[in-house]
Amino acid sequence: MNRTNSAGYRPDGKWGDVWVEIKADLHGLRNLRSSLLGLAYWLTEHRNSRGMLVVTNSRISARRLEKEWALAERALQPDVTHRLSVVLLRDDRYIGLPQDLGNDFRGWLDGLVEQETRSRAVKSRESFYDVLEVLVHQWLLGKGPVTREWLMRIVGCSYPTVATSLRRLESSLTHHSDRRVELRYFPREEWWRLLAVADQVRSTSHFVDRSGQPQAFESLIRRLKRLGRGDIAVGGVTGARHYQPDLDLAGTPRLDLSVHSRGRKIDLNFVQELDPALQKSKSREEPSRLVIHLVRRTDSLFERSDDGTVWADPVECLLDLHENRLEQQAQEFVASFSRTNRKFA
């Protein structure tokens, strides 16, 4: 019962025989109809279940919602509509909540709404920082302006999310007549905000070596190449040297890897193939030998060199330098890219 359906969809929660989908900030009728249709499809595959669409923080009026439901009743199979309900949450009051479900269900539903609202807030924050990182990537490499549609495709988010992110970055942007955008300068203020939450945004994991005979970083990278994984890239000091060989970086304090995955969790078992002595750290006070960061956007922006090494993009490397407390080197890394027509805030 935990699987998605053939369309890759699964409601947010289940209480007994009731499947519940939570939709926050649902302001357009098109999105409302799409949500209703997704839940209706689900009920056609779960004939002994009920479905409930809970709409929260929406500008859609209760009257408009009733009209849309009336249209849905005419369009959908009666077997589905009599098992499907639409509920509007407004001012902590549920409008249209079936009375037979009782107070226990109401308490469970309150928890689900809070959980999904919090989860969506986290995803929104992560999407903003993904947009920021991609724009900084374009700026560092001098790749020029991009469209909102391109940002949607690279990040893997909706048009409203891109639009909201660009409004937040408005003071740092140049808008072109063809509606493309690019950074005018390095957005230092938002960048420092990203650094403050980078561990959470990138789901960073630390590994230590307690064997007393740690493997050389070069050996770990060779083993990584033998794995043939295109979704794991070398970043950190090693990656920064790849992009800027003349950068003043003495020694390698640790190996930073970036793993591309759209999911919120990743399988870290590959670490044992790199070095069985590496163990996940239980304390940030321990010196890390290997650090792994998650890259969630649709396009990893990794690049592969002729020798088969996969490299994290320059922005991931820059974040790693900051996390290594190599602040001066991080500034030099940014400055080492061409500054043509660029300024700093």
Image (cartoon, rainbow, N blue to C red):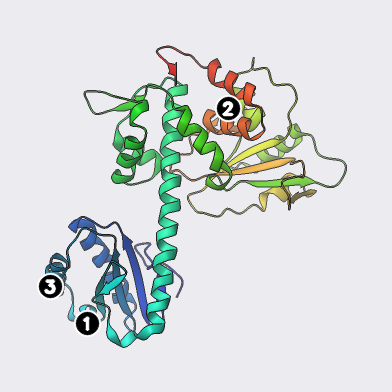
Residue at numbered disc 3: 70
Callout 3 amino acid: Ala
Comparing 244 with 167, the one in front is 167
Mark drawn on residue 202: none
Residue at numbered disc 1: 82
Residue at numbered disc 2: 305
Which residue occupies 80% across, 48% down? 277
The secondary structure type at the circle numbered 1 is loop
Q: What's the distance in space between the residues labelled 1 and 3, CA to CA?
A: 12 Å
- Where on the picture, by quarter, is residue 171? top left
N-terminal of the pair, mark 1 or mark 2, is 1
- Whether residue 231 appears in this view of the structure is no
The secondary structure type at the circle numbered 2 is loop
Disc tally is 3
Left or right: where 334 falls relative to 108: right
Position of residue 9 measured from the top left corner of the image (x, y, whole percent)? 36, 64
Closer to the observer: label 3 or label 2?
3
Comparing 306 with 142, the one in front is 142
Callout 1 amino acid: His
What is the crowding at mark 2: few (fewer than 14 residues within 10 Å), some, or many (at least 20)?
Answer: few
Position of residue 304 measured from the top left corner of the image (x, y, whole percent)? 55, 31
Left or right: where 94 falls relative to 216: left
- Where on the picture, by quarter, is residue 234? top right
The secondary structure type at the circle numbered 3 is helix
Q: Classify 162 as above or below 99.
A: above
- Where on the picture, by quarter, is residue 30? bottom left
Q: What's the distance in space between the residues labelled 1 and 2, CA to CA?
A: 58 Å
Callout 2 amino acid: Ser
The answer to whether mark 1 and mark 3 are in CB contact below 8 A is no
